[in-house]
Amino acid sequence: MIFDRLLGLLSKDLGIDLGTANTLVCARGEGIILSEPSVVAVKRGTNKVLMNGEAVGERAKQMLGRTPGSIEAVRPMKNGVIADFEITEAMLSYFIRKAHGRSRFIHPRVIVAVPSGITTVEKRAVINSAERAGAREVRLIKEPMAAAIGCGLPVTEPKGSMIVDIGGGTAEVAVISLSDIVQSSSLRIAGDELNDAIVKHMKEVYNLQIGEQTAERVKIEIGSAYALEEELSKEVRGMDTLANLPRTVTVRSEEIREALSGPLEQIVRCIKGTLEGTPPELAADLIESGITLAGGGALLRGLDKMLARETGLPVRRAEDPLTAVARGTGVVLDQIDTLWAVLEDGREVG
């Protein structure tokens, strides 16, 4: 027990937002200390990480769509859960090592944020990966709870708070009260599907094949969920699927908004379904407190206006939506005594 307490003093407790698109790491008392893409570069046909295990994150993302035949840039997280166990373990090991920066004999306690809808098997995969990557103790927190805490919502009070967290792989919707999730939905349609919708649109309308990163830039620069006061346009470069030659076309925000409407409609249905299952007293609270948007998807132009129109509730975007989940894990680490109830003990999973 004394030895364990000593390790606790020497180690740096970490909170990890292990996202489909990006991984953020928060340290107790320090805030966010690492934010990198959830990408790993490996030798094709193997799980050997290049550059002596250092081809992870930003270095690896730069290789997406640009690798020679012998190299593969892999995103080991799919829809918020582990798609490739070994590569996720290598990625986590790199991030923990980089964030912890202590002796390899001193291992950190780690809180990992996971989608609310994942299975026990998927939870166990996250825990095993974190433990094998160097964590001394692992606890889980549901992403919507972490996002709500990171946004400063009164999750411990007897009143309803609603969070919509749209990440890369999942859209998390939850109504929270008294340190627990009362009603929630987890939809495996989010930022990646918005990118895919743009890729599909460019191919169908312009016979232009574009990559994932180009689609994401289009979404960020001219994408929207609601009519803009001044519509935008952008030149997009890709490969002409008929001539098999590079080509540039100009696209407008109106057509990209139409392309995004399908995935966005599914997210709206998910939100409405969660509201329908919310107890009346908590639903009444939401008329005043409204919906708080978090995650990278919250940055889509006009999403707050579109959701307000569809639900009739006030909608606000979190101050820094991209980091809400990670900041939430940091708050839990800093206030572990009062927020202990929101965590799930890794040893009790499966």
Image (spheres, rainbow, N blue to C red):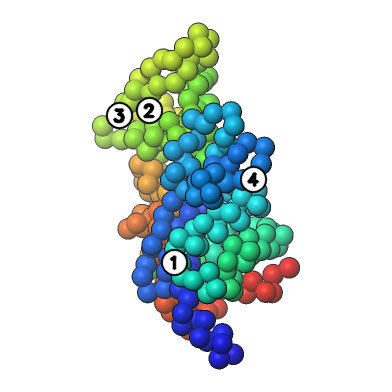
Q: Secondary structure at mark 1?
A: loop
How far is disc 3 from disc 1 in space, using C-alphas? 45 Å
- In percent of width and height, residue 176 lies at 51, 68
Q: Which one is closest to the eye, mark 4 or mark 2?
A: 4
Q: Secondary structure at mark 2?
A: helix
**Contact check, label 4 and label 2, Cβ < 8 Å:** no
Which mark sits nearer the N-terminus, 4 or 3?
A: 4
Residue extending furthest toward the front: 52
- Among the 4 quarters of the image, the one containing residue 274: bottom right
Q: Secondary structure at mark 4?
A: loop
Residue extending furthest toward the top: 243
- Within 10 angstroms of label 2, few (less than 14), some, or many (20 or more) residues? some
Q: Which one is closest to the eye, mark 3 or mark 1?
A: 1
Label 4, on which residue? Answer: 47
**In the foreground, 259 or 236:** 236
Residue 87, relative to residue 104: is it above or below? above
Which mark sits nearer the N-terminus, 3 or 1?
A: 1
How far is disc 2 from disc 3 in space, using C-alphas? 8 Å
Residue at 52% from the left image edge and 74% from the top image edge: 106
Label 1, on which residue? Answer: 101
How far is disc 2 from disc 1 in space, using C-alphas? 47 Å
Residue 291 visible in the picture: no
**Contact check, label 2 and label 3, Cβ < 8 Å:** no
Label 2, on which residue? Answer: 254
Q: Amino acid at mark 4?
A: Asn
- In percent of width and height, residue 294 lies at 42, 55
Residue extending furthest toward the left: 230
Q: Secondary structure at mark 3?
A: loop
Q: Amino acid at mark 1?
A: Gly
